[in-house]
């Protein structure tokens, strides 16, 4: 193959039919959902759409059809970059687009309710449990590089495509719930906890890159030694470059991921505070409009019933407002309190 120069890195492309079909399907469904909401008169953030299309689907296209895919069979580092893009960057872009909430809101009510139930089922809750999903991401990377999986995928086309999908799904199992699907997470997984989990995930995501970079045995060594082009670095140096690229991308992705969680945390606090202020204002206005002296006290039938009524009224007054109201903010507070 021709030497991989900067120009060829930017201009070399090849079609990947399965990946292209996936991109078209995801993009078409997302666009259909946005149009459905607009016809119903409901807004949808253009920034979410841009994140889904450009960062999510765009990364998927780059990983599977750019020069990374053209040269991944002869040089290791493009394959390493390709895999980390599918495992970390593409899931982050797809999650920022919040496709699951879009689907729930765009689908007819029965279908939306079924999807919501499916997303909160036991299997999904298990797979998206933060510690489980983090372990799955790490296990996926280590399995690919330190078993015959990767070397076999280089020889077998359909397994190579399955590996793409495997990486994308494994990464999405962690990213999507943490960013968008609070219902699938445990009640204790509040925004501060999620920020800690994202920080921990950033540390764990660095492990495969470090191991690949320092591993003494060549990964898919027989394949790359046989297909090694004369213009590329030594095979061992090529593997070190690939591991370093994996490490760098993993750490670069961790920062915007963490900043997104912190932004969501601040936004949730603002919404909760505003809702509490509105509720207190409403209570103050109601108290001012109906002075206590103007309301005659009902005569109880007997002293026992009077005591019971007084106790019940007192209990209702001291119960937090989020326990007695049904809205999104109250539900979020109840989840935070584990109720």
Image: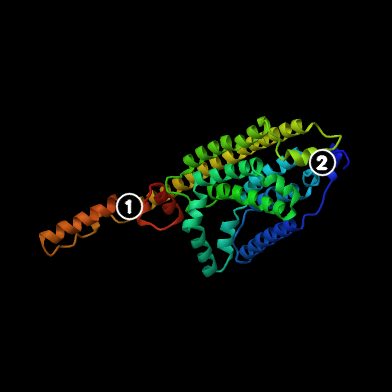
* Residue in the picture at 22% in, 56% down: 312
Residue 285 in sight here:
no
Give x and y (percent) for residue 151: 71, 45
Instruction: Identify the element where label 1 is drawn.
Output: helix
Left or right, residue 289 beside residue 64: left
* Residue in the picture at 14% in, 61% down: 305
Please state which of residues 116 and 207 is positioned toward the viewer in this rendering: 207
Disc sitting over residue 227 in the figure: 2
Instruction: Identify the element where label 2 is drawn.
Output: helix
* Residue in the picture at 55% in, 51% down: 180
Identify the image quadrant of residue 299.
bottom left
Residue 196 in sight here:
yes
Left or right, residue 85 beside residue 276: right
- Tell me which label, 1 or 2, sits earlier in the chain: 2
Q: Is residue 233 above or below residue 71?
A: above
Please state which of residues 68 and 186 is positioned toward the viewer in this rendering: 68
Count of marks, rendered view: 2
Left or right, residue 14 beside residue 242: right
Near mark 1 (Cα within 10 A), the count class, few <14, some 14-19 or many ≥20, is few
Of tags 1 and 2, the one toward the viewer is 2
Disc sitting over residue 236 in the figure: none
Please state which of residues 149 and 256 is positioned toward the viewer in this rendering: 149
Give x and y (percent) for residue 253: 64, 39
Identify the image quadrant of residue 242.
top right
Give x and y (percent) for residue 11: 85, 45
Give x and y (percent) for residue 188: 42, 45
Near mark 2 (Cα within 10 A), the count class, few <14, some 14-19 or many ≥20, is few
* Residue in the picture at 58% in, 43% down: 139
- The residue indicated by pointer 1 is 288
Residues at circles 1 and 2 in contact by the CB criterion of under 8 Å:
no
Left or right, residue 41 beside residue 18: left
């Amino acid at each position: 193959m021709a030497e991989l120069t900067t120009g060829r890195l930017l201009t070399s492309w090849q079609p990947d039919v399965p990946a292209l079909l996936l991109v078209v399907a995801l993009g078409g469904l997302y666009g259909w959902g946005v149009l459905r909401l607009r016809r119903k008169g409901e807004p949808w953030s253009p920034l979410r759409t841009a994140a889904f299309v450009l960062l999510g689907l765009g990364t998927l296209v780059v990983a599977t059809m750019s020069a990374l895919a053209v040269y991944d069979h002869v040089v290791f580092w493009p394959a390493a970059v390709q895999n980390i893009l599918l495992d970390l960057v593409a899931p982050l872009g797809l999650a920022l687009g919040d496709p699951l909430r879009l689907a729930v809101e765009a689908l007819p009510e029965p279908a939306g309710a079924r999807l919501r139930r499916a997303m909160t089922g036991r299997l999904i809750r298990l797979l998206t449990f933060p510690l489980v999903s983090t372990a799955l991401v790490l296990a996926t990377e280590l399995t690919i590089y330190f078993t015959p999986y990767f070397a076999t995928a280089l020889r077998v086309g359909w397994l190579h495509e399955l590996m793409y999908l495997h990486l994308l799904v494994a990464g999405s199992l962690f990213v999507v719930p943490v960013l968008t699907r609070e219902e699938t997470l445990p009640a204790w997984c509040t925004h501060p906890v999620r920020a800690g989990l994202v920080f921990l995930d950033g540390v764990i995501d660095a492990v495969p890159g470090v191991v690949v970079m320092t591993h003494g045995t060549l990964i898919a060594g027989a394949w790359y030694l046989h297909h090694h082009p004369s213009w590329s670095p030594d095979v061992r140096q090529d593997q070190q470059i690939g591991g370093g690229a994996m490490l760098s991308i993993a750490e670069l992705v961790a920062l915007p991921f963490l900043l997104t969680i912190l932004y969501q945390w601040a936004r949730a606090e603002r919404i909760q505070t505003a809702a509490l202020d509105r509720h207190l204002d409403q209570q103050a206005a109601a108290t001012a409009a109906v002075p206590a002296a103007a309301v005659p006290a009902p005569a109880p039938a007997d002293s026992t019933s009077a005591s019971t009524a007084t106790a019940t009224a007192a209990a209702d007054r001291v119960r937090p407002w989020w326990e007695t109201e049904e809205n999104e903010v109250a539900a979020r507070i109840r989840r935070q309190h584990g109720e």
